[in-house]
Image (cartoon, rainbow, N blue to C red):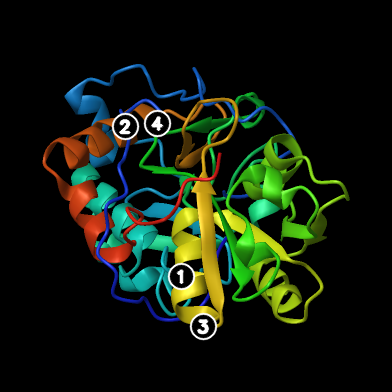
Amino acid sequence: MRLRGSVAVLPLVLPILAFSACAPVDDAPSSTANTSSGSGSAAPDDCAVDSLPLRTAGTLTVGTDSPAYDPWFRKNDPTNGQGYESAVAYAVAEQLGFSRDQVTWVKVPFNSSYKPGAKDFDFDINQISITPARAQVVDFSDGYYSASQAVVALKGSAGAEATSLADLKGLRLGAQTGTTSLTAIRDDIQPDTDPVVFEDTNAAKQALQNDQVDAILADLPTALYISAVEIPDSTLVGQFQVSSGDAEEFGMLFEKGSGLVSCVNQALATLQDDGTLDQLQQKWLYDAADVPELQ
């Protein structure tokens, strides 16, 4: 899930897990096992710019949704290199040999990004969770971020009093359509009433403020941003990992069979090894260390 606004000032400690692996998702298992399609390695010459299988020769075309929300992007402008995913995209582009002016962004509605078929981008980056169901029709890079789910409620409300997942069962819960947050409500909380499904995060936030729901769910960085910046009278109730036991990871999405995946994975591995990904998380995301764990 995503949102607008400027980034607040919380330092970050969000661990990225071992490389191999909300974010909107279909109602499918959330396991990330064996879903990354870029396990094969490419020879160095195969990853030279002139050898890459690009949609437009000499240009790296990157997709993301619009609006592009903080803290993943800044000011709804993926081209400025600000926000975690914009920064990661440009860092990968640089590793592949592209200058900034050789990167072009295109708008891709989230729910269409992981549908089967040809794509008008080389890869899409938009908090897309790697899931087995999606990996059947698209390819993913290795994971570049690992996230837990989090719950946001208004201060003083019933939602704010929850200290466990069981405490949430009797509440009115909501999340953006097609997200892993919505799946987590259904699979992990299993509320007494069906969750409220919203078209986007803005609608979910508005419903929370209008007392149409007791709490909303989002990935942790987004939830931190909502409670710290967007809805000051809200509180971050807690975080939890999905019941599958597999960490939810975001990956770059490719057309099925893309020959670019292995080269992007090499770039990501370099950025992981030299500490760049960690530095970008420290810069653009938030501190999760003090967020309570919901069991």
Q: Residue 286 appears at what percent x and percent y? A: 34, 62
Is residue 61 shown above or below 262?
Answer: below
Question: Which one is closest to the eye, mark 3 or mark 1?
Answer: 3
Q: Is residue 38 visible?
A: yes
Label 2 crowd bin: few (<14), some (14–19), many (20+), radius 10 Å: many
User: In the image shown, does 201 or 255 lie closer to the viewer?
Assistant: 201
The amino acid pointed to by label 2 is Asn
Q: How far apart are marks 4 and 1 (CA)?
A: 31 Å
The residue labelled by disc 4 is 261
Q: How far apart are marks 1 and 2 (CA)?
A: 29 Å
The amino acid pointed to by label 3 is Pro
- The N terminus lies in quadrant: bottom right
Is residue 212 shown above or below 41?
Answer: below
Task: Say the numbered circle drawn on residue 225.
Answer: 1
Q: Distance between the residues labelled 3 and 1?
A: 10 Å
Which of the 4 image quadrants contains residue 73?
bottom left
Q: Residue 25 appears at what percent x and percent y? A: 66, 43
The residue labelled by disc 2 is 265
Instruction: Tell me, yes or no, whether the two marked residues, 2 and 4, touch with CB atoms within 8 Å.
Output: yes
Task: Say the numbered circle drawn on residue 232.
Answer: 3
Question: In the structure shown, which secondary structural element does the residue marked by tag 2 occupy?
Answer: helix
Earlier along the polypeptide chain: callout 4 or callout 3?
Answer: 3
Which residue does the image show at 35% across and 16% down from the upper left?
40
Question: Which one is closest to the eye, mark 4 or mark 3?
Answer: 3
Task: Say the numbered circle drawn on residue 23.
Answer: none
Earlier along the polypeptide chain: callout 3 or callout 1?
Answer: 1
Question: Which one is closest to the eye, mark 1 or mark 2?
Answer: 1
Question: Which one is closest to the eye, mark 2 or mark 3?
Answer: 3
Earlier along the polypeptide chain: callout 4 or callout 1?
Answer: 1
Instruction: Tell me, yes or no, whether the two marked residues, 2 and 3, touch with CB atoms within 8 Å.
Output: no
Label 1 crowd bin: few (<14), some (14–19), many (20+), radius 10 Å: many
